[in-house]
Amino acid sequence: MKFMIRWEAHPDKRLDVLKTWCDIPAEQRTEMGPGVNFIGRWHNLPEFTGTLVVETDDIMALSVYLSHWSPVMDLEVSAVLDDEESVAAGKAL
């Protein structure tokens, strides 16, 4: 399953979040832990918000990854479909 995670850094933690993010080596930024595959991440830096898309069948593994960030940002998790999946779902109606 694919999940879209929308995030917003807490106003009093924004600079801490940015510093922590910048200190993560590039090759480690896509490591979500076992069972969670990184698809993409987009940042709206002026607003300290962004979107992460991952794929996993292990919601516990995703929860563990997200729990590292939840003390400093609000997270909204939604299951999403790609183009082909949405067409298949639409045709099944």
Image (spheres, grey):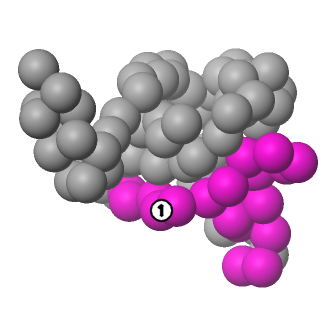
Q: Relative to 22, does residue 21 appear above or below in the rendering?
A: above
Residue 28 falls within the magenta-colored stretch: yes
Quarter location, residue 22: bottom right
Please, is residue 50 above or below residue 78 in the view? below
Q: Is residue 64 left or right of residue 50?
A: right
Q: Nearer the viewer, residue 55 or 11?
A: 55
Q: Mark 1 belongs to which amino acid?
A: Gly
**Count of residue discs:** 1
Nearer-the-camera pick, 66 or 37: 37
Rendered residue at 78%/60% (across/down): 31
Density class for disc 1 (Cα within 10 Å; few <14, some 14-19, many ≥20) is few
Q: Confirm whether residue 67 shows in the render.
A: no
| Left or right relative to 67: residue 51 | left
Say which element carries label 1: strand
Q: Nearer the viewer, residue 28 or 10?
A: 28
Look at mark 1 in the image and give the residue it sits on.
40
Report the span colored magenta. Answer: 26-43
